[in-house]
Amino acid sequence: MKRPHVMFTGTGRAVPKRIMTNHDFAAIGIETDDAWIVDRTGIRQRHVAGPGESLTSLAAEASKTAMAAAGVNAAEIDAIVMATVSPDHLLPAAAVEVQAAIGASRAAAFDVDAACTGWIYAVVVAEGLIATGNAETVLVIGGEVLTRIVNWKDRNTCVLFGDGVGATIVKRATKGKGLLSSYLRTDGTLAKLLWRPAGGGEMAASDATIADGSFWVHMQGREVFKHAVRSMADACERALDGAKLSADSVDLVIPHQANVRIIEATAKHANISMDKVYVNVDRYGNTSAGSIPIALDECIRSGRITDGSTVMFVGFGAGFTWGSLIVRF
Ligand code: UT7
């Protein structure tokens, strides 16, 4: 069957109320400064979930906005595919909690764990559900409350991450619009460069694993940086090949927002001008699976994406996982 099978018909986003700036780290005893964080990452602030805010509450809010934009009600949703690595509970899936929260009584609901590439993977899963006749309307969600799984004593990681969720309604394509190509890859041999050593079945959460920090996210930043640039530049090329398009014919690139230097280096390797690349990492930090769908929602609502726009999405994350999509709007 020839693509496109699916298109996006509505988007939404939600972030916690509280904004934490780079200057706020001093108050919690982290030895860092605004100049270092801005210079090395481009991040100026991030949203941090507070009491009463959770992945489920943010995902429900983003989903309701996406449903309103698409003109879809909860009973019409056939499946919820949720990309996250920071669920409110480890059992059952985060998507199940969202299903209950929005009242999507007919929907199958499950999670996809591909870290920061999660939303890209989830869109391809949604395409499969629709192309095989298993669903007509899929709610794809990507988002995190990473601030609840980072080590707030580790300046190598805690300054980088933020909380937020993006939601996308995916439906059968019409008029040749929609998902033109995709590319998904994983290299599990590199898993320990970005992981949580404890908290799973092998080494349970305990006072000891919390005290020694193994319960929280660990990252070898420099190594991750190198792989991210190489893999995302390659993924751009693969998605373009898949859609039989040149970089020039893409109107906008929405990359995973981890670090503006990674984004700039990727664009350079892929021969894409930064004028065409969307950046919001300064305002949100790295929201992992949330970063691309949040940026997509901003681009649609601000008019950066319009009827006929050709957009490339590219991501990289723990696993390592990486991937790309090209979508015609
Ligand atoms: O979402 C996908 C996964 N994540 C990523 O893509 C992140 C990938 N990595 C990165 O973005 C960058 O590697 C970082 C932002 C994490 C680090 O930037 P870097 O330029 O690679 O710095 P570095 O790790 O080489 O560290 C340079 C120095 C070190 O000091 P020494 O050893 O040179 O004395 C660090 O201890 O910067 C120090 N440092 C800090 N200083 C002030 C590390 N974190 C901080 C901090 N404030 N928050």
Image: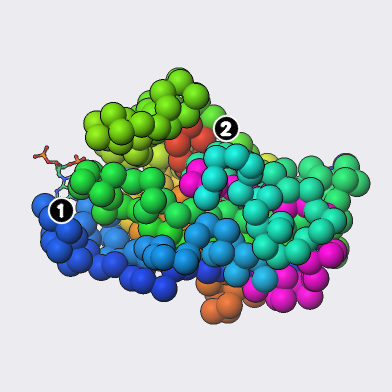
Q: Residue at x 47, y 66 (%)?
A: 52
Residue marked by disc 2: 185
Q: Which residues are magenta?
A: 65-87
Quick check: is 99 in the magenta stretch? no
Q: Residues within 10 Å of mark 2 (few under 14, many from 20)?
A: some
Q: Residues within 10 Å of mark 1 (few under 14, many from 20)?
A: some
Q: Nearer the viewer, mark 1 or mark 2?
A: 1
- Which residue is nearer to you in this view: 207 or 212? 207
Q: Residue at x 53, y 69 (%)?
A: 14
Quadrant occupied by the N terminus? top right
Amino acid type of the residue tagged 2 in the rendering: Arg
Question: In the picture provided, is 127 more to the left or to the right than 145?
Answer: right
Q: How many marks?
A: 2
Question: In the picture provided, is 66 more to the left or to the right than 275?
Answer: right
The Cα atoms of the two marked residues, 1 and 2, are separated by: 36 Å
State which quadrant residue 318 falls in: top left
Q: Position of residue 215 (x, y in %)?
A: 35, 35
Q: Which label was assigned to residue 263?
A: none
Amino acid type of the residue tagged 1 in the rendering: Ile
Cβ(mark 1) to ligand 1 < 8 Å? yes
Indicate the secondary structure of the residue bearing disc 1. Answer: loop
Quadrant occupied by the C terminus? bottom right
Question: In the picture provided, is 313 more to the left or to the right than 106?
Answer: left
Q: Residue at x 39, y 65 (%)?
A: 50
Residue marked by disc 1: 30
Ligand 1 shows up in the quarter that is top left
Indicate the secondary structure of the residue bearing disc 2. Answer: strand
Q: Position of residue 226 (x, y in %)?
A: 33, 36
Residue 287 in view of the camera: yes
Q: Residue at x 35, y 39 (%)?
A: 217
